Image: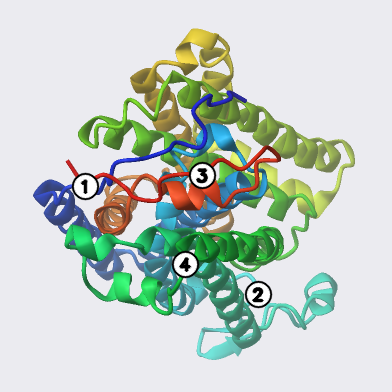
Amino acid sequence: MAHNDTYPPRSLPLRFAAPSAAATFGGLALAVLGIAAFVLTLMGNAGRAWNALHFNWMFWSSVAIGMVIFAVALHLTNARWAWSIKRFPLGGVAFLPVSLVLFPIMLIGGRHTYFHHWLPHEADGHVVNPIAGDPILEAKQAWLNFPAMAVRDIVALVVLYGLAMLFAYHQLRPDMHGLERAGRRGWPYSWLGRGIKGDIAEVAADSYRRNQKIGVFLALAFALLWGLIAIDIAMTTLPHFYSTMFPVAFFISAFHSALAMTIVMVVIHRRSLRLHEWITERQFHDIGKLLFAFAVFWMYINWSQYVVIWYGLLPHEQEYFIRKFNAPFGPVVIAAVMMIFLVPFFGLLPRSIKKMPEILAGFAVIVMLGHWLERFLVVTPNIFDNLKGLPLGLPEIGVGLGFLGMFVFCYTWFLRTFPVLPSPVSLAAVPSGLVNVPVNTTRAAEA
């Protein structure tokens, strides 16, 4: 990775995203559009409406929590090359409350759509229990219990998102010092700045040490709890299917799509916030290499899952792939593989391409669209039987745009509220292994 010769910087400007009517009202308008698309589809085709909500929740929640995990990775590895962009992935934390509120609505409201293969339901005037008489499902009966599933998944999200919030709290806390002199007041500043007394360098060092521990627990929780979410809301939509690689592929996709979203957000805000001096081609080259590397890793994980099942002739596991490879989903599989793996693999091989922000952002958008299609493929072929056409159209796109609007609204609020560049004092709190150099802990007023 690139080494920044000026690290740690002696002084930094105070930068916040400017209030934007386009981002605020545009995000709210898209959110309303998404709600309207969901409600109208629900009245005509409830299955497609709940499926659209389901896979879009998986995609956008994966992006948000994956961005926080990227920030954790930068913190734990002391990634100096990324000091100037570390706030951009942290912004994903702003969407997590929305994800948490929508989860029980999505899970409980659409349970008979997602889990009709095993959930008791009424048919021909009497209750049918698909588990009874099926030896495989009977063996999984303790797990395939919807009330228990809902409780454990909500608890898992509360723990995971709570750790993410706590990590963001200590990342931002040292940067609250002196913001009142810049006219910044309100509950976020009073909450984060509560109890800060004495030497701000000690506060920054304490927050750094705490996040060293929180980050480890959060990374482990992401692997375990996001994997649990993958098993419960995705793998159980085809209850006979079982793969130990499935949750791994699920959270690797989340991390890869988060890298892509971080690139897009850095490119969008770099010019408007006048960050060219601190976000240079070095940062783009390094994060571009990560985008390339995880495209290869994503393909490796998915191929590892596929080849064992296919050549092992595992009948129930093969059904998972047969449903996807056959019509009408086959072309979508090809498109997803091309957008997530082939296009970035060949497109990002040249060193020069990774140093061009706009072109790199174009590849990142392609990767995100590929992961959106992948989330569509994770569950949709399992839910619907005997389809005459591909259930991917205006309802699914409309709900996706609604999620995009909510994400943009939350993310821009984060950049308007908290400094986009970390303060020199928080950077100086990171042990360098070198002789400590005194730094100016003040920041220039916002230009």
Between circles 2 and 4, the one closer to the viewer is 4
Q: Which quadrant of the view contains residue 230?
A: bottom right
Residue closest to the far bottom: 126
Q: Is mark 4 on a helix, strand or loop?
A: helix
Q: Nearer the viewer, residue 331 or 261?
A: 261
| Tag 1–tag 3 contact (CB < 8 Å) | no
Circle on res. 445: 1
Above or below 164: residue 440:
above
> How far from the left and from the top, in percent, is residue 370?
48, 35
Q: Which quadrant of the view contains residue 219?
A: bottom right
Mark 2: few/some/many CA within 10 Å (<14, 14-19, 20+): many
**Residue kind at label 4, given as amino acid type:** Tyr
Mark 1: few/some/many CA within 10 Å (<14, 14-19, 20+): few
Circle on res. 169: 4
Between circles 1 and 3, the one closer to the viewer is 3
Q: Which of 174 and 226 is in front in this view?
A: 174
> How far from the left and from the top, in percent, is residue 134?
80, 74
Q: Which quadrant of the view contains residue 244?
A: bottom right
Which residue is found at the position 63% from the left and 70% from the top? Answer: 117
Circle on res. 167: none
Q: Earlier in the sequence, mark 1 or mark 4?
A: 4
Q: How far, Cα to Cα, is label 2 from label 4?
A: 41 Å
Which residue is found at the position 20% from the left and 46% from the top? Answer: 446
Q: Mark 3 points at which residue?
A: 438
Circle on res. 118: 2
> How far from the left and from the top, in percent, is residue 160?
58, 69
Q: How far, Cα to Cα, is label 3 from label 4?
A: 25 Å
Q: Earlier in the sequence, mark 3 or mark 4?
A: 4
Residue 388 can be seen in this image: no
Q: Is mark 2 on a helix, strand or loop?
A: loop
Q: Is residue 326 left or right of residue 423?
A: right
Q: What element carries label 1?
A: loop
